[in-house]
């Protein structure tokens, strides 16, 4: 789920649709896995299956990048990794500040995927004075009083909010006022931001609720199957030999 507005839209200025931009990380993840296995080329069908999209959509997405593959050979894996990384801005170093070093913030700090994808954790920030100086993932936690100075000194443009909901908007306001223009929000609340600031919201509870819905539906379908009951929607429609009042035979009647 994403909210927010645009800034520095290098890809969008080239006419790449938002939906395509959202799928580029999926392609990059699949391509990176192929690269790690030293796979030199991949067909659109294979890559689409690995990314969870259909091949026609993949080919259309890659056409926006100017990459069309080679007939009978497919796409060059290493070149596509570079091309998509460049398009996403991952070929440069992005300093990131994480605010809120509780269990979630600490887990994010320890995530090893940041560095390999072009992101550098520049600072860890927490409002608890007792946390100041404590190392998390080898980085000493700093107090929120230092937030603005850290952003300016390190040229931070991406902030991660992992605070309780009640503190998130205040943290967001300080990040924006200090020059941060992109925010990844893990707090269970909606942030209000000015024009020119992008917000991506990650709400774990919402994702779990969606999974619960699907689990409930599957459980209901299994219960119906175990009982040997055929749901009305699944029943076959059979022609009836019963005649209508005028001697007509209805085209379809429920069996």
Image (spheres, grey):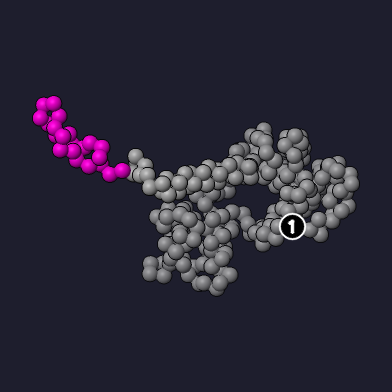
Quadrant housing residue 38: bottom right
In percent of the image, x 50 and y 49: which residue is there? 20
Q: Of 193 and 238, which appears nearest the observer? A: 238
Residue 70, x across and y down, in percent = 41, 67
The residue at the far left in this view is 247
Is residue 141 left or right of 95 when viewed as pictured?
right
Per the rendered image, the range of residues in magenta is: 235-255
| Farthest-out residue, front | 227
The kind of secondary structure element at disc 1 is: loop
Near mark 1 (Cα within 10 A), the count class, few <14, some 14-19 or many ≥20, is some
The spot of residue 76 in percent (x, y) is 49, 68
Q: Quadrant of the N terminus?
A: top right
Q: Which residue is mark 1?
A: 110
Q: Which residue is at the front of the view, 244 or 7?
A: 244
Query: Compared with residue 35, is residue 148 higher up or lower down, i.e. above or below?
Result: above
Q: What residue lies at 43% left-to-right and 65% top-to-bottom?
A: 43
């Amino acid at each position: 789920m994403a909210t927010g507005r645009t800034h520095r839209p290098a890809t969008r200025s080239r006419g790449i649709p938002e939906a395509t931009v959202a799928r580029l990380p999926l392609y990059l993840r699949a391509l990176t896995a192929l690269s790690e296995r030293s796979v030199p080329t991949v067909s659109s069908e294979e890559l689409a299956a690995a990314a969870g999209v259909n091949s026609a959509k993949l080919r259309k997405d890659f056409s926006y990048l100017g990459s069309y593959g080679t007939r009978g050979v497919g796409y060059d894996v290493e070149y596509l990794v570079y091309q998509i990384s460049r398009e996403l801005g991952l070929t440069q170093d992005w300093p990131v500040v994480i605010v809120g070093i509780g269990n979630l913030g600490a887990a994010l700090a320890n995530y090893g995927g940041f560095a390999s994808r072009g992101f550098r954790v520049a600072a860890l920030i927490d409002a608890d004075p007792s946390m100041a100086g404590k190392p998390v993932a080898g980085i000493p936690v700093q107090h929120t009083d230092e937030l603005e100075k850290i952003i300016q000194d390190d040229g931070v443009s991406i902030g991660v909010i992992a605070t309780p909901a009640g503190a998130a908007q205040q943290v967001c306001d300080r990040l924006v006022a200090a020059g941060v223009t992109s925010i990844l929000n893990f707090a269970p609340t909606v942030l209000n931001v000015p024009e020119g600031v992008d917000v991506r919201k990650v709400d774990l509870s919402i994702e779990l609720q969606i999974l619960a819905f699907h689990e409930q539906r599957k459980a209901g379908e299994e219960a119906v199957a175990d009982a040997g009951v055929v749901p009305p929607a699944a029943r076959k429609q059979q022609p009836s030999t019963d005649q209508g009042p005028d001697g007509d035979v209805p085209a379809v009647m429920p069996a």
